[in-house]
């Protein structure tokens, strides 16, 4: 029964994107002789995975900010072009009125 549970856990970890060796290590960490040691080993593994996950999330967030920054730059450029065109039209109108 324990082997089937380990196999199910390994399959779920692999489906989640972990490498086979990492999945086996995590599944095997619950097989410690002492229940306290097993729980601590699992907690340590989960903490390491969470830290790696947070690093990946931060990197993804930075990439999104970069794209947002590019969009903002395009918007500013487009707005500046509109202002410039309006100023040119105004200058042309004023020049005609002055004659």
Image (cartoon, helix red, strand yellow):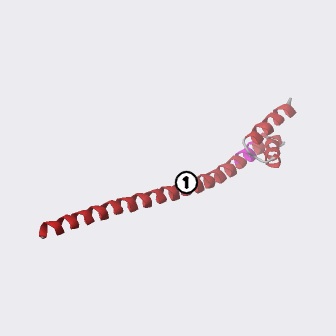
Tell me the SS state at disc 1.
helix
Q: For the point 43% across and 61% down, which residue is it?
A: 73
Secondary structure that dominates the magenta span: helix
| 5 or 29: nearer the viewer | 5
| 88 or 61: nearer the viewer | 88
Pointer 1 residue:
61
| 41 or 54: nearer the viewer | 54
User: Of all residues shown, which one is farthest toward the top?
Assistant: 1
Q: In this rendering, would 39 be left or right of 69?
A: right
**Residue extent of the magenta highlight:** 39-43
Image location of residue 89, percent across then percent down: 25, 63
Q: In this rendering, would 24 be left or right of 78?
A: right
Rendered view: 83 above or below 29: below
Q: In this rendering, would 99 be left or right of 31?
A: left
Rendered view: 76 above or below 50: below
Q: For the point 35% across and 62% down, which residue is it?
A: 81
Rendered view: 81 above or below 35: below
Image location of residue 58, percent across then percent down: 57, 55
Image location of residue 61, percent across then percent down: 55, 54
| 63 or 79: nearer the viewer | 79
Image location of residue 70, percent across then percent down: 48, 59
Quarter of the image where the N terminus is located: top right
Q: How many marks?
A: 1
Magenta stretch: includes residue 32: no
Q: For the point 69% across and 52% down, which residue is it?
A: 48
Magenta stretch: includes residue 41: yes
Quarter of the image where the C terminus is located: bottom left
Instruction: Answer few, some or many: residues within 10 Å of disc 1's Cα (few below 14, many 20 plus, some between 14 and 19).
Output: few
Q: For the point 58% across and 53% down, which residue is it?
A: 60
């Amino acid at each position: 029964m324990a082997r089937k549970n380990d196999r199910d856990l390994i399959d779920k970890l692999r489906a989640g994107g972990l490498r086979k060796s990492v999945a086996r290590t995590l599944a095997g960490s619950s097989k410690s002789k002492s229940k306290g040691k097993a729980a601590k080993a699992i907690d340590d593994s989960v903490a390491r995975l969470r830290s790696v996950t947070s690093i990946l999330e931060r990197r993804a967030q930075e990439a999104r900010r970069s794209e947002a920054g590019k969009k903002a730059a395009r918007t500013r450029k487009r707005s500046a072009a509109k202002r410039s065109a309006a100023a040119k039209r105004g200058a042309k109108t004023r020049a005609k009125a002055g004659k």
